[in-house]
Image: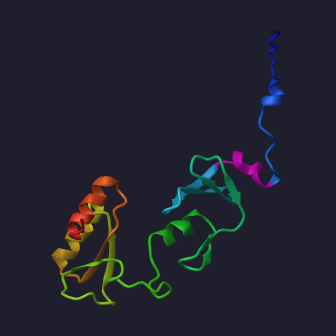
Amino acid sequence: MALSLTVASQAALSAPPMPPALSDLSARIQASLELPGTRVQMLDLEGQSVYLAGGGRYAFTGPAWDLWHGVELQDVAQASALAGRLDRDRLPLDAVDLGALPLNTDVLAEDSLWVFVDPLYPAGLEVLAELRDTGTPAQVVLLPVGGPESLDLARRLRCAP
């Protein structure tokens, strides 16, 4: 029995050429932002927006929308500004449904400030301390994005099993 060994040429192993829509991926990155909760990176490449998924295997071009705000994303600066806020007039959310904890108030008032905070994130805890010290009424929604320790603390704060 004879074994045959085939040696592939470098050309046979190289990746196929990039499609025209992605030919600018080698352009200089002007700005980038990981879109919240997606593991998708938005890149501004010299006037073009490109979206890279997770480990960078998949790339997307074309329009993208922030459905929470109902707007098309134009650039990283706009996406960053939108990512940092929540339009409560557009999204019918209820603080009670989100499990909010009232701060400096006895009731869950709809007109009070809403604060989303990871219970272990130092900057979030500083905001809560400032709100407490100024007496600002707020609804605190625990958002344990920092891993198992944050989730455990959030459960204990909510007296959940």
Picture quadrant of residue 145: bottom left
Indicate the position of residue 93 as horizontal and vertical percent values.
42, 84
Decide: is 112 above or below 123.
Answer: below
Magenta part, dominant SS: helix
Residue drawn at (82%, 14%) of the image: 4
Asked if residue 42 lies left or right of residue 137, the reply is: right
Q: Which range of residues does the magenta coloring cover?
A: 21-28
Q: In this orientation, which residue lies closer to the viewer: 104 or 57? A: 57
Query: Is there any visible trace of residue 24 in the rendered image?
Result: yes
Residue at coordinates 78% horizontally, 32% vertically from top-left? Answer: 14
Q: Is residue 37 left or right of residue 3?
A: left
Q: Is residue 111 magenta?
A: no
Image point (16%, 75%), residue name: 133
Quadrant in which residue 104 is drawn: bottom left
x, y (%) of residue 139? 28, 80
Task: Give the x, y percent position of residue 5.
Answer: 80, 15
Q: Position of residue 80 (x, y in %)?
A: 51, 66
> Quarter holding the C terminus?
bottom left
